[in-house]
Image (cartoon, helix red, strand yellow):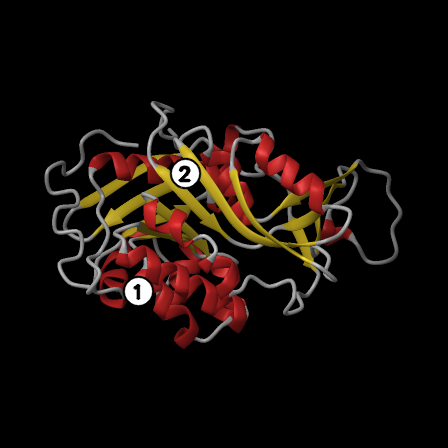
Amino acid sequence: MIPADGERRFSLVAIGEIRIDVRVRVDSLRFRDVCGDQFHYAPVRITPAGVALQMARQAIGLFATVTLVSRIGRDEFADPIRAQVTAMGVTPRLTVVEGASTARVLVMRDTSEGHGVRLMVAEPLSDLQMLGVSDVRAAIREIAAADALFLTGYELLHARSAEAVLEAAAVARSHSTVICLDLVPHDIHRRIPPARLLPLLEAADVVVGELETLRGVVDAPDGGPELLFPLLDAVHKAAPVWMIRSGAGGASRSTIYQQDRLHVDYPTGYERVSDPMGFGDLLTARELRWLLSTGLAPASADGSSFRSVAMNRSRVSGSP
C-alpha cells in the first residue's frame, strides 16, 4: 500500500517548469484504431501543470512547508497560477517574465485498457521561458534551509535549465539538503547524452524512475527490479536510494532499494485509482517523507561518507 499519511513535518523545495495543460480524455476512441481524420466531443480541461507543480500539490498534505521555484510568462495565466499555488498552501517563488507566455501542453488519453494510452504534445520553450540560474539563486535561502530538494529530468533537456538545476543541487549539497531526482521524461536516456545526465544523477541522494527508464540508463536486459541492483550500484558509487516503479502503468509496484541497507517492495494500489493524474507524485512524496523520517541523510558536502548514518539504525523500521 501507499505510505499512510501522518504528522506533517519536514520542508520541501520543488524546482521545475510550470506549463498549461490542455487535457482531453476521448472515451469513444482508441489511438491504435485511428487511420484517418476523426471528430469527437469530449470535456476539455485547461489547468496549470508540470511535474514540480504536481509534486508540490501532493506534498503539501505531507510536509510542513513546500516551496515551488519556477518561471512563468506574463500572460492571462500568470495570476491564476500564482493564486492556485498560494491557495494550495505552497510558497511560490515564481519568476514572472515580461514578453513571454507560459508554454502549453496537449494531453490526450484514449479508452484503451487500464487508464488509457496517453499522448502528450508540448510547445517548445524559448530561452525566456526556461528556468535559469538567477531563478535558483533567488531561492537559495529556501533550498539551504530545506530538508529535501525535488528536481526533475525535464530541466536537463535544455542547457540553460540544466545549469540551473545543477546550481540548485550544489546549494543543496553544501547545506546537507537531501536531493531527490525524478527521472522524467521516461525516455530521458534516449533524449540526452550521458554526459548531461550523470552530473545530476551522481549528486542525487534519492532517484525515482520507472523500471524501463532505469534499464535504459544502465543498459540492462529485461527483468525485474532486483536484476538492476548490481548495475545501479555500479553506475552510482555513492549508493543513493532508488525508488523503482514497475507493473501496470509503470506505477502499480514500488521497489525502494539502497545498497546493503534497504530493500522494500510493495503494491501501490495504482490499479484502484479512478484518475492516475498525480498518482506518481503522491507516491514519491509519501516515500520521500518516510525516508526522511527513518533518518535519511545526504552526502557530505565534499562527497565523502555518503549517508554513513542513513538507515543502519533501522534496516527498515516499518515499511512505507
Q: From the image, tell me which residue sits under label 2.
A: 285
Q: Residues within 10 Å of mark 2 (few under 14, many from 20)?
A: many
Q: For the image shown, how many numbered marks are present on the structure?
A: 2
Residue 245: image location, x then y, percent: 41, 46
The kind of residue tagged 2 is Ala
Is residue 42 or residue 167 the one in the foreground? Answer: 167
Quadrant containing the N terminus in the rendered view:
top left
Rendered view: 233 above or below 31: below
Residue at 52%, 73% (x, y): give it: 159
Is residue 40 or residue 21 the one in the foreground? Answer: 21
Residue 249: image location, x then y, percent: 52, 44
Viewer can see residue 109: no
The kind of residue tagged 1 is Glu
Disc 1 vs disc 2: Cβ atoms closer than 8 Å? no
Instruction: Label 1, secondary structure: give it.
Output: helix
Is residue 160 or residue 284 the one in the foreground? Answer: 160
Rendered view: 301 above or below 91: below
Q: From the image, tell me which residue sits under label 1.
A: 202
Quadrant containing the C terminus in the rendered view:
top left
Please give left or right for residue 257 compared with residue 78 in the image: left
